[in-house]
Amino acid sequence: MQNGCGLTDGVRFDQSNVPYSSGFDLSCGMAAALYWYEAEVDRLAREHLGTGLARINHLGSYACRNINGATAGRRSQHATANAIDISGLVLLMDGRSVSVLADWDRRVRRMPGSFTPLHKRACGLFNTVLGPEYNALHADHFHLDMGRLRACQIGQSIRAGTLGFRPSMAASAEAALSSGTLPA
């Protein structure tokens, strides 16, 4: 670690059960949570769209920077590869693609229930979940991280009762990863 940035006890993620648009580095706890989230995204895609995932598109994980790219302030969870920004999905069978930027608006109804079920499910697996309605910087992606702050933004505001410190799932996720007991 140097200057609050770097990766210790991390993994290179090229693909898990689902390929990604490109490889990236993640902390072990974040990798375990993402593994569980993949299964949920695939299940929800099958349930709502009738087809599974072919690929998950992302905007990156590791970036040595402050929160929101500010010149001063606290380091982002991206600075330690403890976050990822998910921008969209490519679906199996028909090759349809859905993106947060193009398809977030629930009035479009290109995806029954839109991204809401995916966003809500992420709130159960990650400590911080932000999306397009949080601010303009998140207009094209979901930010998922395993930091110490518990914040799950759905709709126009942060969901009641979800802000504040919560013991991170990272320790139990890392234990599951190292022991090989991740769920199938």
Image: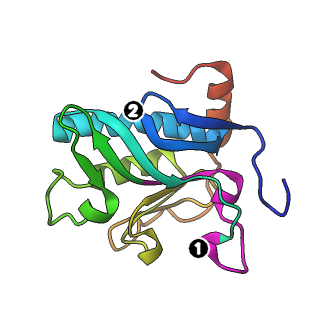
Q: Position of residue 3 (x, y in %)?
A: 84, 64
Q: Who is closer to the viewer here, 79 or 122?
A: 79
Amino acid at circle 1? Asn
Total numbered labels: 2
What is the number of the mark on residue 39?
A: 2
What is the number of the mark on residue 82?
A: none
**Color theme of the render:** rainbow
Point 44% across, 69% down: residue: 138
Q: Establish if 134 lies above or below 90.
A: below
Q: Position of residue 59 (x, y in %)?
A: 49, 56
Residue furthest to the right: 2
Image position of 124 (left or right of 84):
left
Point 32% across, 64% down: residue: 101
What is the number of the mark on residue 68?
A: 1
Answer with the quarter of the image where residue 115 lies. Answer: bottom left
Amino acid at circle 2? Ala
Q: Position of residue 53 (x, y in %)?
A: 31, 35
Point 26% across, 63% down: residue: 102
Span shown in magenta: 67-86
Q: Establish if 141 lies above or below 72.
A: above
